[in-house]
Amino acid sequence: MQGTVDGFNYGLVTPLVAYLMACLGGALGLRCTTRAMLVTRSWRPGWLALGSAAIGSGIWTMHFIAMMGFTIEHTPIRYDWLMTFASLAVAIVMVGVGIFIVGYRGARGTALFTGGTVTGLGIASMHYLGMAGMHLDGQLTYNTFTVSVSVVIAMGAATASLWAAGQVRGFLWSVGAALIMGLAVTGMHYTGMAALDVHVSGTSEPSVGGSPAELLAPMLIGPLAFLVLAGVVVLLDPLMVMGKPTAQPVERKPGIPAHSEIPRTAHRPARHPARHLRRPLAHRRPRAPQNR
């Protein structure tokens, strides 16, 4: 028996909240990636790791908030705890690999393509691994073409987001990149759900796993708390909003004093060049005496 699938049990509430969570994680992660490109190599791994965890937590939270509105007629849904949190780890690790590639190689050329591809595959892997953790009295099948489209959407939009983050053009530029990434994650999720086909075997309730409502509590306590903490770190950094590189220390060279910084003085208007040309050449006093 084929079960009727409903992905919008709560209307537009779950898609909108899920999209906002994906944008939040993407904004924090991409700003951390931008910041990593402006600091020395000693601080870069920390910012890239924080960005990877923020994006991974954001897309994982987005997925299961969207799944709150997913129901199947004639059978309840349960989730395997181990598989569910394994999808979170896979998302953070694979997104981290892509971000570290862009963070060290730059957001251009082969590095951008590789980083965007790995990040997109991490988003898609998180989705389908989370779906594999579903337990119900039936069988899930997927349309191969639609699944391929969802993966391409994730890779393409992830590449565009990493490229935008690598431009380092200020806060609004990163917000736009986060909106693209949020659209990528949400679009990939619902495209993948459109590829789903459920064949229900009976009406018995699965004996293992937790309901979506039971998964909501650890989602809010864990990944959402981390996103708040990452947001505080980003907001406390004075360079995160402006997106300007830190001032490099003055290099000491032979013959140059250690404190040879030019003092800041008031700006004086430059002399008008016409003032030097007012006196005619014939009336200028000769510089050397002439013989008479």
Image (cartoon, rainbow, N blue to C red):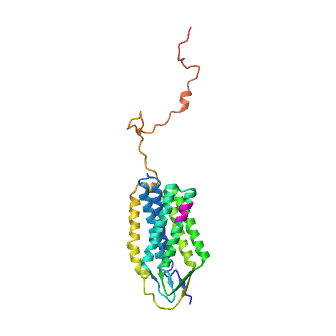
Q: Give the x, y percent position of residue 221.
A: 37, 73
Above or below 4: residue 112: above
Towards the viewer: 91 or 225: 91
* Main SS, magenta residues: helix
The quadrant of the picture occupied by the C terminus is top right
Q: Residue at x 43, y 46 (%)?
A: 248
Residue lying farthest to the bottom in this orientation: 203
Towards the viewer: 233 or 108: 108
Q: Give the x, y percent position of residue 58.
A: 46, 69
Towards the viewer: 13 or 194: 194
Please check the rendered image and state whether residue 123 is part of the magenta-colored stretch, yes or no: no
Q: Is residue 24 visible?
A: no
Q: Which residues are magenta?
A: 113-118
**Label tally:** 0
Please check the rendered image and state whether residue 117 is part of the magenta-colored stretch, yes or no: yes
On the image, which quarter does residue 36 sit in?
A: bottom left
Q: Residue at x 49, y 75 (%)?
A: 129
Towards the viewer: 176 or 113: 113
Above or below 193: residue 44: above
Residue lying farthest to the right in this orientation: 145
Q: Give the x, y percent position of residue 159.
A: 55, 62
Q: Is residue 267 visible?
A: yes
Q: Give the x, y percent position of residue 130.
A: 48, 76
The quadrant of the picture occupied by the N terminus is bottom right
Above or below 262: residue 276: above
